[in-house]
Image (cartoon, rainbow, N blue to C red):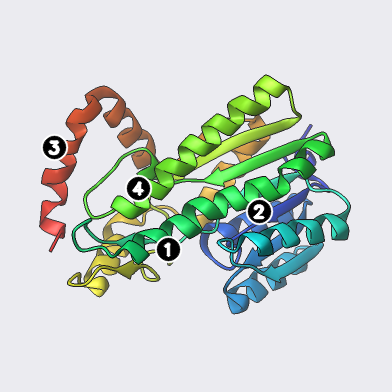
């Protein structure tokens, strides 16, 4: 089976499809012959993604969706199944960022990150999982982060959500194996990807948001969304349980494994100049 044949006519759901990795995933899968259910809270960005995918010949259903709104996600899942008749793959990709130390962060800031980045993944997984099982060839792809592998100061809320996504997804994978359900499960850990996540992030009081976003864009955003999407879809095709994107993600993952809790002092020393 060719690489593209695996995705041919598969119904693929992608949240956060209005930009970044979500848009790149949509275009990648469109080229491979998939049918797409795309959503985002950014309707203008979503419309552009839809335009690009339709130009590639893909059949597309698009909807505005806030993944933190559980009832809306449940209704959305039913609408997607009614539209296409079946759902094969769900890419829970939507996410937001927040930068702030625990002392400076408000409860609402942490809750907002958890609502979108963790509960959004749970909502999407729970809503579509019965449909994926019913398809006989399902796949859940949950996007965590490099920060789901390593914690750094100033990212306590984001770390919490992305570590939670990792634990949730790895447990789900084992449950599918134990029950012998026809659903594969993949957790994705992107490293530095050139997206607008830093520019669109929110920040605790006292943090220079422009400087922080500029530093990310100049020093940490290494890889293109297209590269990330290609890595993800190849990992999905091969049935990998974990997909690390970028040499830095692989290197830091190994670093944490080797140093255990010792990495925390090193990370604190390295990041100290970037904290207020």
Which marked residue is nearer to the observer: mark 1 or mark 2?
A: 1
Q: Are marks 3 and 1 in contact (CB under 8 Å)?
A: no
Q: Residues within 10 Å of mark 2 (few under 14, many from 20)?
A: many
Picture coordinates of residue 176 (x, y %)?
Answer: 67, 28
Q: Residues within 10 Å of mark 4 (few under 14, many from 20)?
A: many
Q: Are marks 1 and 2 in contact (CB under 8 Å)?
A: no
Q: Which residue is mark 4?
A: 159
Task: Tell me if residue 170 comes above or below residue 4 in the rendering.
Answer: above
Q: Which residue is mark 2?
A: 28
Kindly state the secondary structure of the residue where label 3 is placed: helix
C-alpha separation, residue under disc 3 versus residue under disc 2: 40 Å
C-alpha separation, residue under disc 1 versus residue under disc 2: 30 Å
Kindly state the secondary structure of the residue where label 4 is placed: helix
Kindly state the secondary structure of the residue where label 2 is placed: helix
Which marked residue is nearer to the observer: mark 3 or mark 1?
A: 1
Task: Tell me if residue 184 comes above or below residue 154 in the rendering.
Answer: above
Task: Tell me if residue 176 comes above or below residue 62 in the rendering.
Answer: above
The residue at the point 78 percent across, 65 percent down is: 61
Along the horizontal axis of the image, is 97 left or right of 144?
Answer: left
The residue at the point 58 percent across, 58 percent down is: 22
C-alpha separation, residue under disc 3 versus residue under disc 1: 28 Å
* Dot 1 or dot 2, earlier in sequence: 2
Q: Which residue is mark 3?
A: 265
* Dot 3 or dot 2, earlier in sequence: 2
* Dot 3 or dot 1, earlier in sequence: 1
Q: Which residue is mark 1?
A: 112
Along the horizontal axis of the image, is 256 left or right of 223?
Answer: left
Residue 209 visible somewhere in the drawing: yes
Picture coordinates of residue 219 (x, y %)?
Answer: 27, 57
Along the horizontal axis of the image, is 18 left or right of 158?
Answer: right
């Amino acid at each position: 089976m060719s690489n593209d044949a695996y995705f041919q006519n598969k119904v693929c759901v992608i949240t956060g499809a209005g930009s970044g990795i979500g848009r790149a995933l949509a275009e990648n899968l469109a080229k491979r012959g998939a049918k797409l259910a795309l959503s985002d809270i950014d309707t203008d960005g979503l419309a552009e993604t839809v335009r690009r995918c339709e130009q590639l010949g893909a059949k597309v259903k698009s909807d505005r969706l806030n993944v933190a709104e559980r009832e809306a996600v449940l209704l959305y899942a039913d609408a997607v199944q009614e539209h296409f008749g079946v759902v094969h793959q769900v890419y829970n990709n939507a996410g937001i960022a927040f930068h702030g130390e625990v002392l400076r962060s408000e409860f609402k800031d942490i809750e907002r990150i958890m609502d979108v980045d963790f509960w959004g993944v749970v909502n999407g997984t729970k809503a579509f999982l019965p449909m994926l099982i019913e398809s006989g060839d399902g796949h859940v792809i949950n996007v965590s982060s490099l920060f789901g592998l390593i914690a750094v100061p100033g990212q306590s809320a984001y770390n919490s959500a992305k570590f939670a996504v990792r634990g949730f997804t790895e447990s789900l994978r084992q449950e599918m194996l134990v029950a012998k359900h026809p659903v594969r499960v993949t957790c994705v850990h992107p490293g530095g990807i050139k997206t607008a996540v830093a520019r669109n992030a929110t920040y605790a009081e006292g943090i220079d948001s422009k400087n922080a976003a500029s530093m990310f864009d100049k020093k940490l955003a290494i890889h293109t969304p297209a590269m990330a999407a290609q890595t993800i879809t190849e990992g999905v095709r091969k049935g990998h349980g974990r997909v690390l994107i970028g040499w830095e993600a692989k290197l830091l993952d190994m670093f944490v494994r080797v140093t255990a809790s010792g990495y925390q002092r090193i990370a604190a020393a390295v990041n100290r100049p970037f904290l207020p």
